[in-house]
Image (spheres, rainbow, N blue to C red):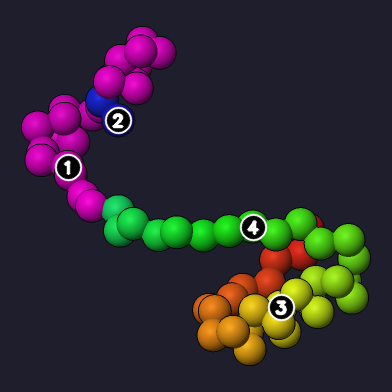
């Protein structure tokens, strides 16, 4: 983050700049499926759920 801020001419506040700020983001493997319509979404969701996949529905 420090390098990103410096690249746009900004700096971290001094109290943050001196702190060790590292963290690990766990690996995930995901697929986004574009469906034709709500019916198609429901059908694909049900099929994959029966196959044992952990699913979330996203409608935009």
Mark 1 Cα within 10 Å, few/some/many (few <14, many 20+)?
Answer: few
Q: Which residue is mark 1?
A: 21
> Element under label 1?
loop
Coordinates of residue 59 in the picture (x, y in percent) = 77, 64
Q: CA distance from mark 1 to mark 4?
A: 31 Å
Along the polypeptide, which appears first: circle 3 or circle 1?
A: 1
Along the polypeptide, which appears first: circle 4 or circle 2?
A: 2
Q: Which residue is mark 2?
A: 1
The answer to whether marks 1 and 2 mark residues whose Cβ atoms lie closer than 8 Å is: yes
Mark 4 Cα within 10 Å, few/some/many (few <14, many 20+)?
Answer: few
Range of magenta residues: 3-24
- Quadrant of the snapshot with the N terminus: top left
Along the polypeptide, which appears first: circle 4 or circle 3?
A: 4
Q: Quadrant of residue 27?
A: bottom left
Mark 2 Cα within 10 Å, few/some/many (few <14, many 20+)?
Answer: few
Along the polypeptide, which appears first: circle 2 or circle 3?
A: 2
Q: Which residue is mark 4?
A: 32
Q: Which mark lies nearer to you, 1 or 4?
A: 4
> Element under label 3?
helix
Residue 5 part of the magenta-drawn span: yes
Coordinates of residue 7 in the picture (x, y in percent) = 35, 13
Q: Is residue 53 above or below residue 11?
A: below
Along the polypeptide, which appears first: circle 1 or circle 2?
A: 2
Q: Which residue is mark 3?
A: 45
Mark 3 Cα within 10 Å, few/some/many (few <14, many 20+)?
Answer: some
Which residue is at the front of the view, 57 or 30? 30
Q: Is residue 52 above or below residue 34?
A: below
Using residue 12 as the reference point, say whether residue 47 is left or right of it: right
Coordinates of residue 9 in the picture (x, y in percent) = 36, 10
Along the polypeptide, which appears first: circle 1 or circle 4?
A: 1
The answer to whether marks 3 and 1 mark residues whose Cβ atoms lie closer than 8 Å is: no
């Amino acid at each position: 983050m420090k390098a990103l801020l410096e690249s746009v001419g900004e700096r971290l506040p001094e109290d943050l700049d001196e702190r060790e700020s590292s963290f690990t983001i766990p690996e995930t493997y995901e697929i986004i499926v574009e469906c034709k319509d709500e019916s198609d979404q429901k059908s694909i969701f049900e099929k994959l759920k029966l196959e044992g996949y952990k699913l979330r529905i996203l409608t935009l």
